[in-house]
Amino acid sequence: MNRKKLQKLTDTLTKNCKHFDKFEVKCLITLFYNLVGDVAERPGVVTGLDRNVFRNILHVTFGMTDDMIMDRVFRGFDKDNDGCISVSEWIHGLSLFLRGTLDEKMKYCFEVFDLNGDGFISKEEMFHMLKNSLLKQPSEEDPDEGIKDLVEITLKKMDHDHDGKLSFVDYEKAVREENLLLEAFGPCLPDPKSQMEFEAQVFKDPNEFNDM
Amino acid sequence: MGVALTRLAQWTAAGYETGTLEITPLNESILNEITKFVESFSYKYPQEAKFVFVEPLEWKTYLEPSAFELGYVVSATTAESEETGKDGQPLLFLSVPYIKVRSFGQLSQLLSIATDSKLQEAQACIEANRDPVVKILGPDYNEMKEDPTRLTLLDTIIKDKETYMKRKVAILLKQLDLHLLNHSLKYISLEISLNPGTFKKDIELLKRFSGKGEQTVLESIEYTSDYEFSNGCRAPPWRQIQGEICYVLVKPHDMETLCLTCSTEGVFLNGGKTEEEGEINYERKGEIYKDLVTCLKDKSPVFSENMSKHEIRFTEEQQKDNQIFEKPKTEDGHSSVAGSEKSKIEKISFGKSPMTKRLEPSLNWRVTVDYKDHKSSIKDSQEEKQGKLEKSSSVSVAPSRAQSHRKGGEKVEETVSESSSESEEDEEPPDHRQEANADLPSEYWQIQKLVKYLKGGNQTATVIALCSMRDFNLAQETCQLAIRDVGGLEVLINLLDTDEVKCKIGSLKILKEISHNPQIRRNIVDLGGLPIMVNILDSPHKSLKCLSAETIANVAKFKRARRAVRQHGGITKLVALLDCGQNSTEPTQPSLYETRDVEVARCGALALWSCSKSHSNKEAIRKAGGIPLLARLLKTSHENMLIPVVGTLQECASEENYRAAIKAERIIENLVKNLNSENEQLQEHCAMAIYQCAEDEETRDLVRLHGGLKPLASLLNNTDNKERLAAVTGAIWKCSISKENVIKFREYKAIETLVGLLTDQPEEVLVNVVGALGECCQEYENRVLVRKCGGIQPLVNLLVGINQALLVNVTKAVGACAVEPESMAIIDRLDGVRLLWSLLKNPHPDVKASAAWALCPCIENAKDAGEMVRSFVGGLELVVNLLKSDNKEVLASVCAAITNIAKDQENLAVITDHGVVPLLSKLANTNNDKLRRHLAEAISRCCMWGRNRVAFGEHKAVAPLVRYLKSNDTNVHRATAQALYQLSEDADNCITMHENGAVKLLLDMVGSPDQDLQEAAAGCISNIRRLALATEKARYN
């Protein structure tokens, strides 16, 4: 990609992104194209990160492990649902990942947890997301009992309107009361440590890019 | 008596007939108790004292017949009492060296005659009469089985006087017996500490700390035998007889395997276990150590080294175990007391079921029959009695045991202890765990479930569980203890050690709440929570820092915790938190884990406040550069920031270093500013800090210059908050030491208010109020003011208090008022002088001195002072005797009082008779200028009577006085010159002065600007010179 094009792309993306400055956008774009690799640009074919590459990034860079959650995060990034993450989706997603406000994050997390996208996190969805969260005790008769109980506890804590499922309002209220519940059903944001490492690595040494 | 004697007294030989009592503390105390009982018998129970024994008590006495006087018929080798029994026989018959006694009356008389050899006689009597009860009451009464209530019932039935009397005596003897048993149990329980239980625990604990690796204390520790007898011993029965409990094979890191014997006597190395036969050579091969740990420490250096690292934990565990097992233990200890005693006396082996063992003490009673006609009641009365004994003995045993354990635990602490100004809640509260399953609240089970998820969940589940746990009322003790009891504390603390920020935050949020509970604090420290929290202070996440600091603030409320914080470098880190406040570059988007810098600093200050209650921590805070940071934070205007900051400063201001630094950092200014705050707590701490700092004169001036006196004065009007009032009055007291401040206070009408506070206030307030008035009354106007406001009466009323600090201040204030004659009249009318005089008898030297100082103006200004002083019976003697004190301040004050007393000729005569001259002379060799001055004044006054001048010379008071002239204090010079002038009226004194070079020194004094000094010096010189002239004249004539 030539310099002029990159410059233009940077400018447009910076305009649409409130959390990154121009330099940071430039870095991320560079990173994106490094990750995508040398695919010849052809009109009509979308260049971007496919699911597997992206999951790999999530796993290696942001330390996520849960397959299901990673899928959901991919969907969260892939706004246009075309199965691959374009450069603008990449910048948008990372802007939330790294710099998102609480409101933005809540919205994003809720979407991640709302598996079927019906606007509610149902008991079944919770169960699905939490099913691996407890150590299985061989002695217990019903291995799922603990999970069910945990779901009940969560509902008790977060379901303010007592309708047996979490609406966004419920979720938002609970998270505002207790920030720790933001990622209540699994880590879908980078943990602070890997976030810092990522930023340090990507945004390092501005001089290197000055002459671009 | 019988039981105690036969069972408990320690006889030398096993053979009953010829045994003599060993001289042991136990026996001595038993004998003492018996003699006390017998001695008091005749006047406590005069009726029963006449009761004639069935058989006489007969023994070989050391008493001579001549020792018996009134009431006895005495010959060269015999003595018999005039008192006789019904049969006409004397009740006491002595035929050297044998004596027969037949009543308690005679016995007690005998003991009073024996005086010094009382114990000897009692011992001889008991040695010769091994069964005194049988002899006194007849064989039927050998053992008593009755309880008093039944006997009183019987009393009404039995009319026969003889039997009645016998019964009464029997009860008395039984009571003595019980008393003796309890008494000796107390003794025994102090001595015996080793039993199977203690060993078992020790070994189990050591096992826990054993294994491979450098850090463990031992490689292994094993019993030689897996079989445990029901009494807890593992030694074979035939060895148990020797008191041996078990054998252990110990493999330390640095030595061959040791084979140790644990016995009731202690722990020692035995001959070892032979490989092929598996037999133990029981022979002792070395010293006996008091317990296993001591033994191993001595044997293995590595053990001792590693042990010292583990020691705190080890002893804590020991303590904990003891607390948990306290109940079984007392019983255990009790039975082993009886058991080991028995093995000494009767050689009964250990091999019995615990049940029978516990009943053992009762066996002692079960020996013989009861009253023939009440046989049916034997059994239950016996049980009752046994119950009684068990109860009383366990009562007497339990506290002393518990104490000795505690001692063991505390010792470790003491060795690393520190001096500190700790206060509240330094005593460990009793650790009461909830009884298992006894009506547990539903929260308990819910919390238990949550803790299970904490333990077995991934971070998502953990966060949910943590958040849910916070929904419980964590301020409630049930929940706090429930978390601990289901093992939640361990998990919470473990979470702090992970990398999961969310889990750490969640865990700290809970710990912060539950650590308000003193027990939980201790548990957190025991579980090693503090070092982890101290580490978190380094975290990049501010909210983590905050929570951690806040939790530390809660936990560090007791000494051990404060020390732990310091030892893990917590103080430096906490001080570093204070620095955050300066950074103005707040992050633009507050992320999940961030919070404001000010908040971090506030939490840091909060933790430092808790920590600053220990002396060493104050020092550490200063060294870490905390003072400038605190000073900077003091400039902010957030109340919740200011309170911990001022609180810390106020704690620390008890240290000299801090006061200097506080002055240097211009902290006073801000303290004064905050006095005007709305917040009462803040005002209180500011006033308190000023109180601490205002010992220093410059600081007092600073308070005035920054306008601090006015808010202080106005705060006086609000008396509802007593803590604040105490702090404010304290600050006023210290500030009023400076005259300029007093003038200001008068302007602000503070003195009137202070007088109003003299009644109905708690002592902490009174001390300060009176102290402030004492300072104010140094000024004439204020004295008048205090009198006009009616302050004298309440002040005099306070003279009868007992609070020492208050008395010191009250006497000072009264003394200050007495300077003014009109006030003095009131004091006199209220009998204040007598009250002051009585305070000379107060045990505390400060009070004595202060009272004596106060008396000086009283005597000076009272009308008819001489008569008044004489009216105090024994008062003058009391004052003179105070000259024997060894407190310089008391001596100086008493000398001053004597100076005033001696102004009256008659009183001077009296104190001369009481020997004031030699006492004053004795004090002459002193370097204390204050004492010198008042002593010289007293001497000069006392010279005015009789031949006192000569007497001072004889008691060698003159030469030291001359040396006073070399002092740097003009007051001393003046007083000394006057004294010397008085003394120089005597020729011998003149010679002494001349010999000691007084003339040259006095010549210099003549040039002094002080007229009195000039005059006295000149007069003295003239006396000396005149003598010289006279001698010269005599020589040449």
Image (cartoon, rainbow, N blue to C red):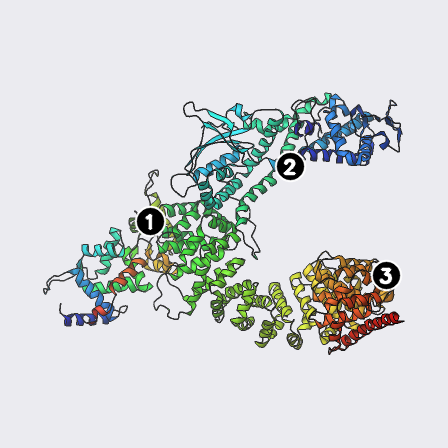
For badge 1, the amino acid type reads Asn
The residue indicated by pointer 3 is B910
Question: What secondary structure is found at the residue carrying circle 1?
Answer: loop
Task: Give the number of the disc on residue B458.
Answer: 1
C-beta proximity under 8 Å, tags 2 and 3: no
C-beta proximity under 8 Å, tags 2 and 1: no
Question: What secondary structure is found at the residue carrying circle 2?
Answer: helix
Residue at image location 76% in from the left, 23% down from the top: B135
For badge 2, the amino acid type reads Lys
Image check: A140 left or right of B624?
Answer: left
Res. B759 visible in picture: no
Q: Please report, as a chain letter, where disc 3 is located.
A: B
Number of the front mark, 3 or 1: 3
Q: Is residue B31 above or below residue A125?
A: above
Number of the front mark, 2 or 1: 2
Q: Is residue B856 above or below residue B707?
A: above
Mark nearer the N terminus (3 vs 1): 1
For badge 3, the amino acid type reads Val
Q: CA distance from mark 3 to mark 1?
A: 92 Å
In the image, B166 versus B962, the foreground residue is: B962
Within the image, what quadrant is residue B926 found in?
A: bottom right
Image check: B852 left or right of A105?
Answer: right
In the image, B494 versus A109, the foreground residue is: B494
Task: Give the number of the disc on residue B186.
Answer: 2
| Labels 2 and 3 share a subunit | yes
Question: What secondary structure is found at the residue carrying circle 3?
Answer: helix
Q: Residues within 10 Å of mark 3 (few under 14, many from 20)?
A: some
Q: Position of residue B1033 (x, y in %)?
A: 87, 72
Mark nearer the N terminus (2 vs 1): 2
Q: CA distance from mark 2 to mark 1?
A: 56 Å
Q: CA distance from mark 2 to mark 3?
A: 54 Å
Screen quadrant of the N terminus of chain A: bottom left
